[in-house]
Image: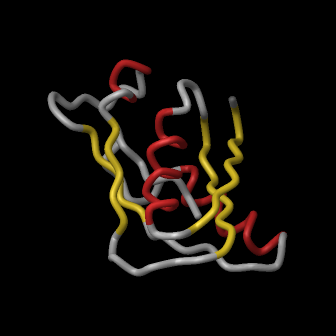
Amino acid sequence: MPVPGGSSRKKKNFASILAPFVARRIGTVSRDLLEGRIEGKHSTSSHPMQSLRFQVSCRDDEAGRGLVLLVDDVATTGVHFSRCVEQLRERGYSAVCISWVS
């Protein structure tokens, strides 16, 4: 599952391109359960201070179980991963995080 974009506001980001390839490689499917946004003043910068305002929510209230592989393109502060994992755990999933560049 890809980490949703925050600063770009785009649905299609590098993580959303990577996740389906990773899923196919390990013999599973990629799902988009999360939506991301930047709270407050917005710019297209991916500066770590803007990352701190990243908020994430699940698209539905579906209860889950099992392991989720959370894929991001770049991990700097870890905020995106930690907030996504928090949302997934609230719904019953376990999560493992991987990033293209850290």
Q: Quadrant of residue 41?
A: top left
Depth order, front residue of 78/19: 78
Q: Position of residue 62 (x, y in %)?
A: 40, 81
Report whether 19 appears left or right of 12: right
Residue in the picture at 36% in, 26% down? 45
Depth order, front residue of 43/96: 96
- Where 38 falls versus 36 (above or below)? above
Q: Quadrant of the N terminus?
A: bottom right
Q: Quadrant of the C terminus?
A: top right
Residue in the picture at 51% in, 60% down? 89
Residue in the picture at 67% in, 48% down? 97
Please state the total of marks drawn on the protein image: 0
- Where 45 falls versus 22 (above or below)? above
Depth order, front residue of 32/84: 84
Q: Position of residue 32 (x, y in %)?
A: 48, 70
- Where 45 falls versus 37 (above or below)? above
Q: Position of residue 27 (x, y in %)?
A: 82, 79
Residue in the picture at 61% in, 43% down? 73
Q: Residue furthest right?
A: 26
Image color mode: secondary structure
Report whether 69 appears left or right of 50: right
Q: Position of residue 92 (x, y in %)?
A: 53, 70
- Where 75 falls versus 25 (above or below)? above
Report whether 41 appears left or right of 24: left
